[in-house]
Amino acid sequence: MSYNALYTDLSGYYDLMCADINYQAQSNSAHRLQQIFGNGGQRHLDLACGTGPHIHHLLQYGYQCKGLDINQPMLDIAQQRCPSAQFELGNMCDFVTDEAYDFITCFLYSIHYSGDTQNLNNCIKSVHSALNKGGVFCFNSVDKNQIDNGLFAKHSVIHENSKFSFGSSWYYSGEGDKQTLKLSIEKSTMEETQCWTDEHPMVALSFYALSALLAPYFDVHIFEHDHDKLLPWDKKSGNAIFLCIKR
């Protein structure tokens, strides 16, 4: 399938694909960081918002939420899930807004969908322009130097008399600023089995290189990828939460 086709054509299965994700814990963690480091504002923008599960939880904290995503079928589902929120079709690497936000999030490693360093830098500039002074940008990331090409995450769910098996893995060649996210879906019924696969070009950076890109625009804090505890990054793990405060 072509780039992003799996998300577009199979958007109805996206929530099943992410059934093992604790959206509430992730949203709670981001909200806690906003409370501690943010400017106290309630205007929120979620980049690569997908079907809106994080917005669903953040609305409960009183945020005025808006979601941006490149796939309209996902946004249609998000609008049904969160009728009080606003949603817009757009690319996080070149979005422009007349509104100013206090809190911008990008969950599920979606920052890597920027694809390459130049697009990522454009995304960072767009976020900086969209934030009020003292606003925060919160996202998670993977360090290219810590990727294990042999690891493969997989889970299965039963839905409407069919068994769905979802798989994902990172692949990094060992050089350059590009890596790949490999995704697969298998749907099995009594009569047949259908399979879909997709590969997404993703930007690849070390945490030190990513921090250097952010530093001209933000005060940067890096935390362990733990949604239950607020722990500084130990400078060893390959998954982390970045909290960036606009100066």
Image (cartoon, helix red, strand yellow):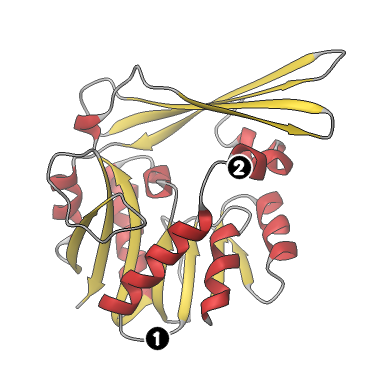
Q: Which label was assigned to residue 19?
A: 2
- In the image shown, does 36 or 210 lie closer to the viewer? 36
Mark 1 lies on a secondary structure that is: loop
Residue picked out by circle 1 = 41
- Residue at 66%, 51% (x, y): give it: 74
Q: Is residue 93 visible?
A: yes
- Residue at 69%, 27% (x, y): give it: 164
Q: Amino acid at mark 2?
A: Ala
Q: In the shown orientation, is residue 152 left or right of residue 78?
A: left
Residue 247 in the image, given as x and y percentages of width and height: 19, 78
- In the image shown, does 165 or 197 lie closer to the viewer? 165
- Residue at 75%, 63% (x, y): give it: 80
Q: In the shown orientation, is residue 162 left or right of residue 180?
A: right
- In the image shown, does 84 or 191 lie closer to the viewer? 191
Q: CA distance from mark 2 to mark 1?
A: 31 Å
Q: Categorize mark 2 by other alpha carbons within 10 Å: few (<14), some (14-19), many (20+).
A: some
Quarter holding the N terminus? top right
Q: Amino acid at mark 1?
A: Gly
Which of pointers 2 and 1 lies earlier in the amino acid sequence?
2
Q: Are marks 2 and 1 in contact (CB under 8 Å)?
A: no
Q: Is residue 63 visible?
A: no
Q: Nearer the viewer, mark 2 or mark 1?
A: 2
